[in-house]
Image (tube, rainbow, N blue to C red):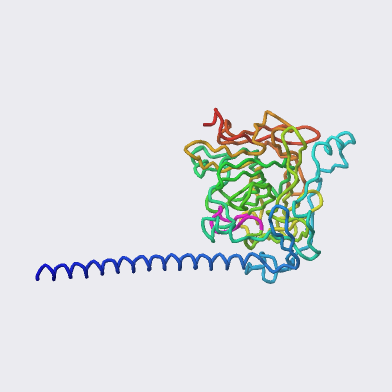
Amino acid sequence: MGDAHFSRRRTRIGVLLVLFWMLGLISLSCAARLGSSRQKLLVQKHLNRLNKPAVKTIKSPDGDIIDCVHISHQPAFDHPFLKDHKIQMRPNYHPEGLFDENKVSDTENEKAKQRSSPITQLWHMNGKCPQGTIPIRRTKEDDVLRASSVKRYGKKKRRAIPQPRSADPDLISQSGHQHAIAYVEGGKYYGAKATINVWEPKIQQPNEFSLSQLWILGGSFGEDLNSIEAGWQVSPDLYGDNNTRLFTYWTSDAYQATGCYNLLCSGFIQINSEIAMGASISPVSAYRNSQYDISILVWKDPKEGHWWMQFGNDYVLGYWPSFLFSYLADSASMIEWGGEVVNSEPAGHHTSTQMGSGRFPEEGFGKSSYFRNIQVVDDSNNLKAPKELGTFTEESNCYDVQTGSNGDWGHYFYYGGPGRNPNCP
């Protein structure tokens, strides 16, 4: 009798335990479902904020969707300080002494034309945006989901800036970012220009990138760094492919809360209807074959104080309003040009992600990547050759930089490398 009672009791306890276990599983799966539906909601809200209603839509051959958005509906105007902003359709001043190809002798002109051919964006093959609109690369759900969080989407990781003066190299490569750059410091700078050779470097891990850009920097390398950046990049994490793309970036607090790539937050005001930030550049250079390059100029309008950007000789893209910055509201204290990669040290080895063409500088034209006609804008709004150009790289056996100057290319440098190799394990 006692045994039967004990056995029934044990069965009841067993049933209760199974019930509790099932309830636990149900509540866990409910919580997971709630979590994922909350995440979906956050992503959707973010997409709605970024993807503005389009006047026209163009499908690019690389799978991108380009939305032609009315100029006054672009993401910049979500910023509370820009609610009543009157769009400036052209800069008041252009820097004087822009590298003028008409001033170059005919033979040098021919040489320059042979050396670098015209460049465009892939989406142009399928249409163009009407006047009064700007082209915006549509953000897809997958783009946002690849980010570490919705909040961090479109933002660089902190400490992603080369610090040539730092005495402790460990401090610099701590974040896994490596550089091969030329730089000037010690003066007041009001802009910078360069013509950048365009390649499609191989990326080893999807969370790594390779870029070639110019940096316009103000403030210290602490929490208050101001930076305006522009160039080309390959970033599978940000774009979901390995295409070479035009990009810009800005921050006013060392990549913490402010700023973003391209038009992925309020900030940069675009006025141009032909060039899309973050869109693929085509064609790209090939080893011992045709070479392609892009010119980028960023300068501060002495009248309004905004920082303007020009792509090539014909496209003034738009401007960063001066109120976005603290130090750069006055001037820059340092300019950098060059390459940057992320080295996540896969399997404990140095990454084989390439910088530039993936070749070392000593290989020269047609093999190694270059920056040419490097200039800075001085306080009289003149483009000048940089004085005392310094160079910096964390590990020259992985990525290196070599400067030079001549009549045709002005100040230039070759840079880059393959990453992992017998001398860079």
Point out residue 406 in the picture as x, y percentages from the top left corner: 78, 32
Q: Is residue 361 magenta?
A: no
Point out residue 163 in the picture as x, y percentages from the top left corner: 57, 42
Residue lying at the far right of the rendered structure: 106
Q: Is residue 254 magenta?
A: yes
Q: Is residue 139 above or below residue 353?
A: below
Residue toward you, 60 or 284: 60
The N terminus - image quarter: bottom left
Q: Quadrant of residue 277?
A: bottom right
Horizontal side of 249 relative to 282 (left or right) equals left
Q: Residue at x 30, y 69 (%)?
A: 19
Point out residue 349 in the picture as x, y percentages from the top left corner: 50, 36
Q: Residue at x 69, y 56 (%)?
A: 64
Please report the bounds of the magenta region as a residue range. Answer: 250-262
Q: Residue at x 26, y 66 (%)?
A: 17
Q: Is residue 198 above or below residue 147?
A: above
Point out residue 377 in the picture as x, y percentages from the top left corner: 73, 47
Residue toward you, 379 or 273: 273
Residue toward you, 185 or 402: 402
Chief secondary structure of the magenta span?
A: loop
Q: Is residue 381 above or below residue 19?
A: above
Residue toward you, 153 or 319: 153
State the count of labels.
Answer: 0
Q: Quadrant of residue 23?
A: bottom left
